[in-house]
Amino acid sequence: NAGVTQTPKFQVLKTGQSMTLQCAQDMNHNSMYWYRQDPGMGLRLIYYSASEGTTDKGEVPNGYNVSRLNKREFSLRLESAAPSQTSVYFCASSEATAGFGSYEQYFGPGTRLTVT
Amino acid sequence: TQLLEQSPQFLSIQEGENLTVYCNSSSVFSSLQWYRQEPGEGPVLLVTVVTGGEVKKLKRLTFQFGDARKDSSLHITAAQPGDTGLYLCAGPLYNTDKLIFGTGTRLQVFP
């Protein structure tokens, strides 16, 4: 059981370049999430998906797009990277639905992105 | 707006000392969770507390949920270097499956 996997682990981009961060989970969870983590700011939600085919904005969605390809996979795309997007990105999944479940989230190992 | 504030932000202690980390809000939460994140890894759930006044123990870690379900604390007894990491509290946004996270407490335990 791999849990939540993310690729790549490290990436360096130049301003204006694009890239897609990949995430997959093998726990049959409905909900998936993308967060960014910056020093002193905790985890901030970028986008989430409550089920296959649905996505919704989180706290900091500007500059990002997402795609819930199927129940297992949830990708995050940076169309034109900016230095302000330098961060550590985490994907997570959960079996919870609104108002039910324990809300426990399982996290991937993260992608460390630097935009120069 | 639901917010979770953690204190202290940083804690450096010697092995064997006791410590308490706090997670406070002005909002009521149906439950609160504590995660630990080690360097280079994603957060891992330690415990979920769901009942006001609830106390849960996990070896040397004691978690408490406030009676009014607005705050929680994590107490570590006889800290060890293996306890080093970032401790995050989190709670569900009302009627959603989204969590909001506190800003974290970074703990360093020196041998």
Image (cartoon, coloured by chain):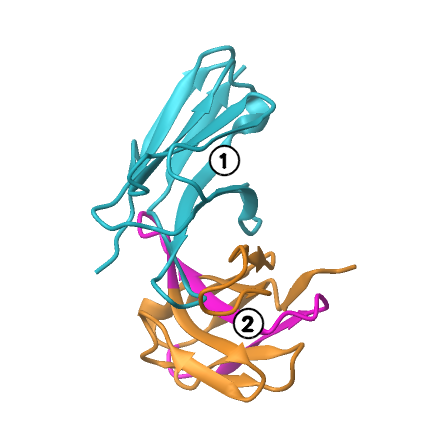
Callout 2: few (<14), some (14-19), or many (20+) C-alpha neighbours within 10 Å?
Answer: many
Q: Position of residue A41 (x, y in %)?
A: 31, 52
On screen, A52 above or below B51? below
Which chain is cyan in the rendering?
A: B
Q: Amino acid at mark 1?
A: Gly
Which chain does the residue under circle 2 lie in?
Answer: A
Is A11 within the magenta?
no
| Residue nearest the observer in this picture, B53 or A24 | B53
Question: Mark 2 sits on what residue?
Answer: A31
Left or right, A44 with respect to A52, comes to left
Callout 1: few (<14), some (14-19), or many (20+) C-alpha neighbours within 10 Å?
Answer: some
Q: Is residue A116 visible?
A: no
Left or right, A62 with respect to A75, comes to left
Is A37 within the magenta?
yes
Q: Is residue A104 visible?
A: yes
On screen, A2 above or below B109? below
Indicate the quadrant containing the C terminus of chain A: top left, top right, bottom left or bottom right. bottom left
Name the residue located 36 percent from the left edge and 55 percent from the top edge. Answer: A38
Question: Mark 1 sits on what residue?
Answer: B85
On screen, A114 above or below A57? above
Indicate the quadrant containing the N terminus of chain A: top left, top right, bottom left or bottom right. bottom right
Quadrant hosting residue B74 = top left
Q: Position of residue B76 (x, y in %)?
A: 48, 22
Name the residue located 28 percent from the left edge and 43 percent from the top edge. Answer: B70
The magenta-colored residue range is A15-44
The tint of chain A in the picture is orange
| Residue nearest the observer in this picture, A77 or B52 | B52
Q: Position of residue A81 (x, y in %)?
A: 39, 78
On screen, A73 above or below B47? below
